[in-house]
Image: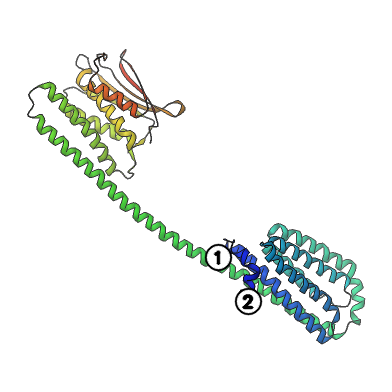
Amino acid sequence: MSDKIKKYFLGSILSKTESLHEESRITLFYNLVLTVFFMSVLSVFISLIIGTLPVILPSLGHTALSLFALFSLRWCKSVKKPALVYFSALYLLLMGNLYFNDATAHIGTPFWIILLNIFVIYTLGIRWGIAFLLLSAIGFIYYLHAILPRIMDILPTLSSATYSSVYYETIFALFLLGYIINTILNSSKKSDELLKKRNEELIRQNQEIIDRDIEKTVLLKEIHHRVKNNLQVITSLLRLQMRELKHEESISKFRDSINRVLTMALIHEKIYKSEGLSKVNLEEYFRELSQDLIKSYQIDFQVQLNYLFEVEKIGLKSIVPLALIFNELFSNSLKHAFVSSTPPFLITLQLRNSDKGYFEFTYSDNGKWKQPGSDSTFGLELIDSLTDQLEGELSFHSSPETVYRFKIKHLKS
């Protein structure tokens, strides 16, 4: 029966409430109003029985106010406005009874004032709580200063029944005090239990995410490892076929193709050996690629390599075309730039942030290059294609040293 009554008055409010604390405040206010209603009705009957008629009027006022508050909860479908009206009316009833009802001892009134302020703070928040505390303090100080001296003269004339009403009034007030403390403690306990449950659920979900991430990482590493192995198989096949070639030009083209494949294979090797599968360390990668290319072309001279990187890591989408561009330029330098030059032989590679979100990739050597003419080689055509893929622009000059400068957009993706 009580659940049906609660659903009747609070159903539309609680259905919209997501916070456990908010639900506790709404339920506390509802239980307070309901309890005051029944206590007020009981107080009327007790007052009629023991003859404390002055207590009947405030008790009837509480009864009517409680009914109004209950139906306001249903009509307003929120707790703030009904609570504010209810607590304001309670304040006026308490102070009115304190100031104008000289036929009672008012010993229990401070309990009700304390309870009212506790309910206001818990239900409406600290700002309204402070406002009610100030009003209560002002009202009670005025009572002590202006009303109490007059009441002191009336107290000896009060009947024993009037004094007896103080007992059940105090008991009611203490009962409500215990009730609100119990409600707050239960709300705190439920919040702790819910928090613990949610925390355990988050830990479980986090562990599932970690497990899935580990599985995906292992799988991706395995994929990159297999791609690298497959590319190495391709290079092995190309090397076997290269042995059958007689012409040096054909052998050179096969070697260039092998190096392009090895350039991509090295990327996949770096990825599956790294902790993060989405980024490749640039300087480490280009240093290793440079050494592999030097070994591949079996040069008989020393090359000094300088690397200047402002960007530490980039993703797989960008590293492949960038590495292939480097492969073409570095291979051409080893094959053609230093043939008619004198030591020291220097190659410099720079990657730095440019203006407006662009990146500047610069390759230079101090050799003597032949400037490309209209009959561009496959390597230069490949460089142009890869530059377009990176949404970049290429500029070139050969004096006093050979410099390729690429202005690239969206390098890190």
Q: Quadrant of residue 265?
A: top left
Is residue 298 at all visible to an observer of this figure?
Answer: no
The quadrant of the image that shows the C terminus is: top left
The quadrant of the image that shows the N terminus is: bottom right
| Three-letter amino acid code at the position of disc 1 | Ser
Helix, strand or loop at mark 2: helix
Q: Is 184 drawn above or below residue 304 in the view shown?
A: below
Q: Is 192 drawn above or below residue 40 in the view shown?
A: above
| Three-letter amino acid code at the position of disc 2 | Ser
Residue at point 76%, 61% (across, down)? 132
The answer to whether residue 412 is left or right of residue 373 is: right
Expressed as whole percent of the image width and height from the top left, the position of residue 28 reads: 65, 69
Q: How is the image coloured?
A: rainbow
Q: Are marks 1 and 2 in contact (CB under 8 Å)?
A: no
Is residue 201 at all visible to an observer of this figure?
Answer: yes
Disc 2 target residue: 2
The answer to whether residue 253 is left or right of residue 180 is: left
Residue at point 15%, 27% (across, down)? 254
405 or 76: which is nearer to us?
A: 76
Expressed as whole percent of the image width and height from the top left, the position of residue 369 reads: 25, 15
Q: Mark 1 against mark 2, which lies toward the viewer?
A: 2
Q: Quadrant of residue 154?
A: bottom right
The answer to whether residue 392 is left or right of residue 186 is: left
Q: CA distance from mark 1 to mark 2?
A: 24 Å
The answer to whether residue 402 is left or right of residue 182 is: left
Q: Which label sits on residue 191?
A: 1
Q: Residues within 10 Å of mark 1 (few under 14, many from 20)?
A: some
